[in-house]
Each structure stands twice: as structure tokens, then as C-alpha cells.
Image (tube, grey):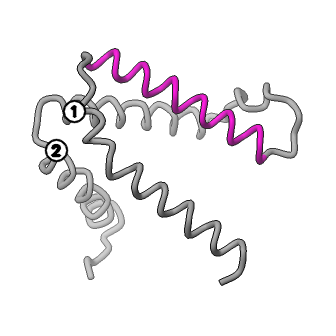
């Protein structure tokens, strides 16, 4: 494998491990839903800013806060999704949450794009 492919593989593995432990860490933390959402958003935002600072060719951090309309809509939908995910973990079993979270792309693909499941 080339160096870029190796780095990509490592990053995907880190993302998969992080994604799969989200329910566990949400259950372990003994806070309410708004507090969990606040700290998850703060740390997520700081990580995004750090990645932007390292990978961006631009020297202005202000560019991180300039949103187009599409980016704004994606941010709102993502925030609603995270709020739903955290709330669902608090009120349901993690296995049920994972099942729903994994099935949503299949349902959207089937309903919106009329694609066949293979």
C-alpha cells in the first residue's frame, strides 16, 4: 500500500472505532441530555477547528465560520440528528439505536431514490 492509502486506512479504522463506542460512552456518562449534547458539541467543534487549522491552506480561522446556505442546512440537520441520537440512547437500548441508525440509509435509499437493496 502507498503511504496515502495507509493513512486513509488508519483514519477509517479510528473513525469506525470512535463511531462504535459512541453509545457506550453516552451510557457511561452520568449527565442529562442537554449537558451531554453541549459537551459533545464543544469537543466536536474544537476537533473540527483543529483539523481545519492543520489541513487548510488558508491562514484565516474566520473562513471556518462562513457558511453557504447548503452548509447551514447540513449543520442544522446534523445537530438535529445528534440530538435525536443522544436522546434515543438515553431512553432506549443501544442495540435498538444501532439497528435504527444503521437502517436509516437503506430506507432513505429505497424511498427517496427508488434503489433496490442488494
Q: Is residue 6 left or right of residue 15?
A: right
The residue located at (32%, 47%) in the rendering is 21
Q: Does the magenta stretch include residue 102?
A: no
Q: Position of residue 44 (x, y in %)?
A: 52, 33
Q: Does the magenta stretch include residue 44?
A: yes
The residue located at (60%, 29%) in the rendering is 46
CA distance separating discs 2 and 1: 9 Å
- Secondary structure beneath label 2: helix
Nearer to the camera, 113 or 48: 48
Q: Are marks 2 and 1 in contact (CB under 8 Å)?
A: yes
* 45 is higher (above) or lower (below) than 110: above
**Residues drawn in magenta:** 33-55
Residue picked out by circle 2: 94
The residue located at (21%, 33%) in the rendering is 27
Q: Position of residue 40 (x, y in %)?
A: 43, 28
Q: Where is residue 108 in the image (x, y as percent from the top left)?
A: 30, 58
Pick whichever of labels 2 and 1 is earlier in the sequence.
1
Q: Nearer the viewer, mark 2 or mark 1?
A: 1
Amino acid at each position: 500500500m502507498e503511504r496515502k492509502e495507509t493513512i486513509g486506512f488508519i483514519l477509517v479504522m479510528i473513525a469506525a472505532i470512535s463511531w462504535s463506542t459512541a453509545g457506550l460512552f453516552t451510557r457511561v456518562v452520568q449527565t442529562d441530555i442537554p449537558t451531554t449534547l453541549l459537551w459533545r458539541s464543544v469537543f466536536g467543534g474544537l476537533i473540527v477547528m483543529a483539523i481545519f487549522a492543520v489541513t487548510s491552506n488558508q491562514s484565516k480561522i474566520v473562513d471556518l465560520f462562513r457558511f453557504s446556505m447548503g452548509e447551514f442546512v447540513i449543520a442544522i440537520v446534523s445537530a438535529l440528528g445528534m440530538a435525536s441520537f443522544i436522546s434515543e440512547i438515553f431512553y432506549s437500548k443501544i442495540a435498538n439505536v444501532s439497528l435504527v441508525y444503521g437502517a436509516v440509509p437503506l430506507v432513505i435509499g429505497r424511498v427517496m431514490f427508488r434503489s433496490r437493496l442488494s
